[in-house]
Image (cartoon, rainbow, N blue to C red):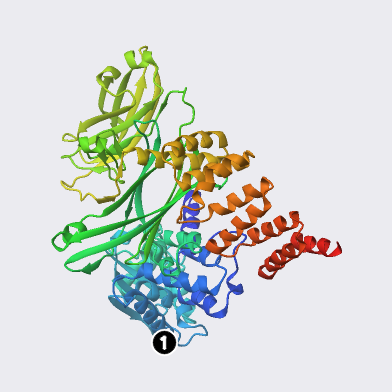
Amino acid sequence: MNLNMKKLLIVLVLLLSFNFIISPANKKSPKDLPEKYRKWLEEEVVYIITPKEREIFLQLETDKERDMFIEAFWKQRDPTPGTPRNEFKEEHYRRIAYANRVFGRGTPRPGWKTDRGRIYIILGEPLDIERFEGQSLIYPTEIWFYKGDQRYGLPAFFNIVFYKDKGIGEYKLYSPVTDTFRKLIIDKRIAGGDPETAYYELYQYDPELAQAAFSLIPGENPPLNTPSLSSEILLGNVLTLPHRKVKDEYAEKLLKYKDIVELDYTANYISCDYLISVIKDEEGNFYVNYSIEPSALSVDYYNKKYLAHFELNGKVTDLKGKIIFQYGKSFSLEIPEEKIDQLRASSYAIQDCFPLVPGSYKLSVILKNTVSKEFTSIEKDIYIPKNENIIQMSPLILGFKTEKKSYYLNVKKPFTIEDFQIFSYSKNIYTNKDNLIVFYQVYNLSPDIEKNGFFKYIIKNKKKIFLSISKPLTEFGNKQSFLVSFPLTDFSPGFYTIRVSLYDKDNNEILFEEKEFQVSAFSVIPRPWIISKIMPKNEKTRAEIKFILANQYYSLGNIEKAKRILEEINKRFPQLRYAQLLGEIYFLNKEYQKVKELLMPYKNSNPKSFAFLALLGKTCQALGEFEEAIKIYKEYLLHEGTNLNILNLIGDCYYKLGDNEQALIAWRKSLELNPNQPSIKQKIEQLKKK
């Protein structure tokens, strides 16, 4: 056997050790688990749990989390999730019981630990078993015959062979590569002799056994002096088959979101596809547009209609993890009875958009279906261009159609610009009947480029140019947003790449963007139903958008930018929310009189929230108006409930007024609620000494 063959065999043998995984240093050992969880991990699911699932299970801290994980583990494998029974789980435990009852006989180990038990638990009942026992030529041997699932890398039919090494002990899994047929033959002279003679003796005894001894795949006839690598690959695929039958990304999501989503959602993670694009609108604001396409939809049926309700929570953080923006929205879906089959044949997409100031961020979105208690999530790095003086090109957005309506000039929808909407599909799959829509933006074009520049569009298939077209910028009416369309009639099925490049008048490539897409052999591709909310484009909405941007600048520490925006919108559309954030900025700048003038009118306006009174009280306190501050603080406590910080501030105000008795009452009340306040204890002790 040559060196390369030996290396390959080593790799293949490692495939059989499917429990092998490099573990992070901070995870627990199974021996640290309570007994029932250790048994579950190392006995009940040892052959079907994926390495990722095992690793995450060992990172869980509490029994509650482990129970939650186990529920999710079985749910991911349930072939009929809409019914009370989990047929996979029932069958799995039946196989374990059978293995213990049958394959543990005559061995010191329980049946599930034996090789036959392991294969039975993974593959279930074979189509046929041929046994060779009490023979003079070969040791006890069994051939299990299976039908394979070709979707998971198994041949249409295959054998699994077990034998008793030297005729004693329990049955071992046989490998044509690492064991060879000689392990099956009793007569040492035949086993150690010429391969052809040994094979002939085995063939004369039983042709099917001889075939299986050389290859586990019926019909494969490797040379007698060459091991059947296909058999070794088959064994590796069999032992790792349970890993390929489940999408284990849910385990990572469960670990990540177990403290965020409600308990009844945690076991119900479903996968999704998604699309995220940044588009600069005609008013100069950048919007993050995204589409989430969950893999499943559960609905309620009421009054001849199918109903679903979704809750969406988004969060944007900077690269250090600081929250810059977070929001929540709800979406409802109502489907007439006659259209439910149409929806089942396709999918659905929740689409949304929000403004974001320049910078680099991480976007995290959780989408919950309140009907089924399922959730899905997306996480993506987001970049909003910063420098207004540098020419930049946005990533390409590919779509299968556009819709142009003057109506869009008056509303804001996801994936719209001016008066048209782009319809995209996250997988970027098209048919010959589609047009490939390509949309992109270029920021900060110079007058020379606008006049003399041109775009080149190159579409490649397997690195060969399939289409190449150039268009001067003067052909486009809009010098920021560009949209082109390519009929796909002549495109054969396959994978393609489109490259859009911007050139100057001297034929120098300045910028480019690329994106992959696929042309399907199918004539029809189900497109997702789109569920989204529409915002009217009016002055109040614009003020709300500016408030969101001001909040983001404030979170990023750009106080002056936030201040300018808030002063503008609060002047035109005075609202408590606008005034409160502006008041916080004035307070930071020690412009206390401005804070008081801004917030005092809302004190007697019967507002929905009285949280602003805390800021107003601090402002009066900073101005030395301690009696006024105490009144405002007490009003805050009346409406908003007990607050330790406010109680302490009331004590400070009484102390400044020289009313030590009332100061002590406030501080002692605070300590009753939280005794762990060393600074308050120190104030009380100092006051007692006086």
Q: Residue furthest right?
A: 689
Residue 570, position in %: x, y? 46, 39
- Name the residue at 48% across, 76% down: 165
Residue nearest the observer in this picture, 105 or 638: 638
Measured as percent of width and height from the top left, residue 536 is found at 30, 42
Which quarter of the figure is the C terminus placed in?
bottom right
User: Pointer 1: what residue?
Assistant: 101
**Three-letter code, disc 1:** Arg
Residue 452: x, y in percent? 33, 13
Query: Relative to the observer, which residue lies in front, 381 or 650?
Result: 650
What count of labels does the image hold? 1
Residue at horizontal 36%, vertical 70%?
160
Q: Taking the image as drawn, is residue 358 in sight?
A: no
The quarter of the displayed image where residue 222 is located: bottom left
Query: At 52% from the left edge and 76% from the top edge, which residue is drawn?
Result: 37
Q: x and y percent of residue 29 in the render?
A: 60, 69
Query: In this view of the protein, can residue 653 be seen by the observer?
Result: yes
Left or right for 602, reference 204? right
Q: Residue at x 55, y 40 (%)?
A: 556
Q: Secondary structure at mark 1?
A: helix
Most foreground residue, 678 or 511: 678
Are there few (<14), some (14-19), or many (20+) residues within 10 Å of tag 1?
Answer: some
In this picture, residue 108 sits left or right of residue 134: right
